[in-house]
Structure formats: C-alpha cells, structure tokens
C-alpha cells in the first residue's frame, strides 16, 4: 500500500515538474545521437545543425556517433533515453523504412519518438573509384551488367540511404553486385578512395568535395534537375536512367514522452538554425538546402514521416527483403 502510494507520488511529481523543466530548458549540454559513423553525411548535417542550435539555445549541443545495423543501434539508444530533451536523434529516410524492413526490434521505431522538425532533403550521387573502367552512366551500366557480383558496392547497412539507392540502381540495371556494409558511408568513402570498393550511391553532403577534387568518378545525380554544387554532373534522366531518382530527408527526434514545451523549444531552435547564414552556405556547398521553416515543425514532420512510412511499406513488403 505504502509502496503504491509512493509510486503514485513520484509519477505525480514528474508530471508536475514538466512545465518548470520546460521553462528552465535547456540548462545543460544536449546530445544529438547520429546513428551512423563519424565523417559521413548524417554526421556532417548533424554537426552543422548542432552548432547553430547551440547558439540559439545558449547551451552546447554535442554530436555522438552510434553507428551500426542500418541506424537501429543509435535509434534504440534515443528511444530508450530519458525523455527530457537532452538526448536527441538526427536520422534520415531510414526512419520511414525501418518500421517495415525490421520485424523484430528492441524499441518502437515509430511510437518511441516525438518528431521535432524536418531539416533537409539531400540529393544522391552514383560514384565510383577513380580507376573504374567507365566515364558515363551508360558505360557504368555496361560494366555492372558484365561484372555483376565481381563488383563491390558499399552501403551503410540495411535501411541506410545508400542501401535503398543501391536497390534502386540494381533493379534499374537488372544486375546484382556484392554488397559490403559499413557503419556509415564515412568509412565506406575511405575504402572507395583507396580503390577497395568499386561503387557507392551516397549523399552529396559526403561526395561533393571528393567529386570536385577529382578523387572519385561520378555518373549521375539522382534529382530531377542538375544541382548548383555539381553543375557538370548529369541527372540520372539525362544520363539515360530516369527511374534512378531518390533524395534523403532528415529530421530531428526526441524520445516519446518528452514534454511538449521542450519539443516546441527544440523545434524553435531548429527553425532558427536552418536560417543561420553559415549553415545555409555550407549546406549549399554540399549540394543541399534547409527545408522551408514551416516544415521544421513537429506537426509537419509527423505528417511527412507518417506518409513516407505508408509509401515504403508496400514497396518493402512486395520486395520481401527484410533485415531480420
Ligand atoms: C546512409 O547511407 O544511410 C548514410 O550515408 C549513412 C551515413 O550517414 O553514414
């Protein structure tokens, strides 16, 4: 009896602490968990966002990498973190595919999170090691169809953007390659630069500088129109493969149960961050742009996320390609 009363009191005091907690928020360092390795595209976006949000929040926002299993390891950490706004997740399109790709997870990939706001939609590029024996997408397709599993294709695990993009490519050219998974495309990039990996489809936030310094070959950008950061790179449609189109949306999440005023404060800081001159300029150099301000809200993020889950579910079910 006494124990039940004590528990009830504790629950009541936590609820009562909500508004006060929100008023003081944030009073210490915030951690953004990136569910992929350091040096990759999600990490790059996260560090720019963390720095700019920190300026608005008046607190340090640090980035911690927890890569592996296509982003599910880092996501689990956040879903199970204390819902106080001090542990956040910055993740991409994988938040929409994981609920269908993984049938057994130790956390709830949808109900475990509060969306805070959308961040950016990043184009992808098909890149190859410098001495890959092709100079155009048409030539690359000929090599892929001839060499098939002799070619190594890198990705960041099942559910990663590089995985989805690779599936799209292999379906479009109707030839499989040998897939080599990494904890993120940051480490995969090192392997393609040394020539141990042949091909990779990766976000411009990880490839633009390598492409512009001729460290890699590039065959197409997966957007409808060419992008200013890579003006000489043809779109997939121009290069003869119109079905090869994909962009990678990113969003910020708090654990389920985070008080609404805290989520609102974080969203407000995100909206300010996405207008930060330094961030906008760097996003532009890396081939992307922040979303419009009204998309960096919990409501817009939730609606977009739910629609994308519904879009991917039948595609994944029809392909029958599950991660577990
Ligand atoms: C991906 O393929 O999902 C990303 O490139 C992951 C990452 O940020 O490394």
Image: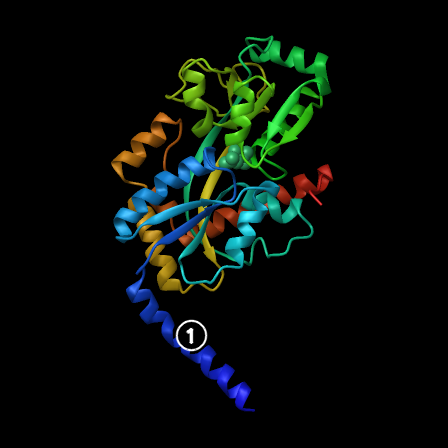
Q: Is residue 240 left or right of residue 149?
A: left
Residue 9 pos. (x, y %): 45, 83
Compared to residue 236, the image places residue 203 above or below, namely below
Any part of residue 246 in sight? no
Between 206 and 139, which is closer to the camera in this rendering? 206
Q: Residue at x 53, y 48 (%)?
A: 74
Q: Is residue 268 left or right of residue 64?
A: left
Residue 206 pos. (x, y %): 46, 28
Q: Residue at x 44, y 52 (%)?
A: 88
Compared to residue 218, the image places residue 223 above or below, namely below
Residue 266 pos. (x, y %): 35, 54
In the picture, the quarter occupied by the N terminus is: bottom right
Q: Is mark 1 within 8 Å of ligand 1?
A: no
Compared to residue 304, the image places residue 144 above or below, namely above
Residue behind mark 1: 14
Any part of residue 286 in sight? yes
Q: Is residue 142 left or right of residue 203?
A: right
Label 1: how many Cα within 10 Å (few below 14, some 14–19, many 20+): few
Q: Residue at x 29, y 66 (%)?
A: 23
């Amino acid at each position: 009896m006494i124990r039940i009363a004590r528990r009830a009191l504790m629950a009541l005091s936590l609820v009562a602490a909500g508004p006060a907690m929100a008023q003081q928020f944030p009073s210490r360092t915030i951690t953004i968990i990136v569910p992929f390795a350091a040096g990759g595209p999600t990490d790059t976006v996260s560090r720019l966002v963390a720095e700019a949000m920190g300026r608005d929040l008046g607190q340090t926002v640090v980035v911690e990498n927890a890569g592996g299993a296509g982003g599910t390891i880092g996501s689990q950490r956040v879903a199970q973190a204390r819902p106080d706004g001090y542990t956040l997740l910055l993740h991409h399109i994988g938040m929409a595919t994981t609920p269908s790709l993984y049938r057994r997870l130790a956390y709830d990939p949808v109900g475990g999170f509060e969306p805070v706001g959308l961040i950016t939609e990043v184009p992808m590029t098909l890149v190859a090691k410098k001495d890959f024996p092709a100079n155009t997408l048409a030539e690359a397709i000929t090599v892929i169809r001839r060499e098939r599993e002799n070619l190594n294709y890198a990705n960041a695990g099942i559910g990663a953007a590089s995985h989805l993009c690779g599936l799209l490519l292999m379906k479009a050219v109707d030839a499989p390659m040998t897939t080599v998974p990494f904890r993120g495309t940051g480490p995969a990039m090192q392997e393609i630069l040394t020539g141990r990996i042949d091909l990779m489809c990766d976000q411009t936030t990880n490839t633009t500088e390598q492409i512009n310094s001729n460290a890699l070959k590039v065959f197409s950008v997966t957007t409808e129109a060419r992008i200013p950061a890579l003006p000489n790179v043809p779109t997939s449609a121009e290069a003869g493969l119109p079905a090869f189109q994909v962009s990678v949306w990113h969003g910020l999440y708090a654990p389920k149960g985070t008080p609404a005023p805290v989520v609102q404060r974080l969203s407000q800081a995100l909206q300010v961050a996405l207008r930060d001159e330094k961030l906008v300029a760097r996003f532009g150099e890396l081939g992307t742009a922040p979303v419009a301000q009204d998309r960096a809200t919990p409501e817009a993020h939730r609606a977009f996320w739910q629609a994308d889950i519904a879009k991917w579910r039948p595609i994944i079910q029809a392909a029958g390609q599950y991660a577990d």
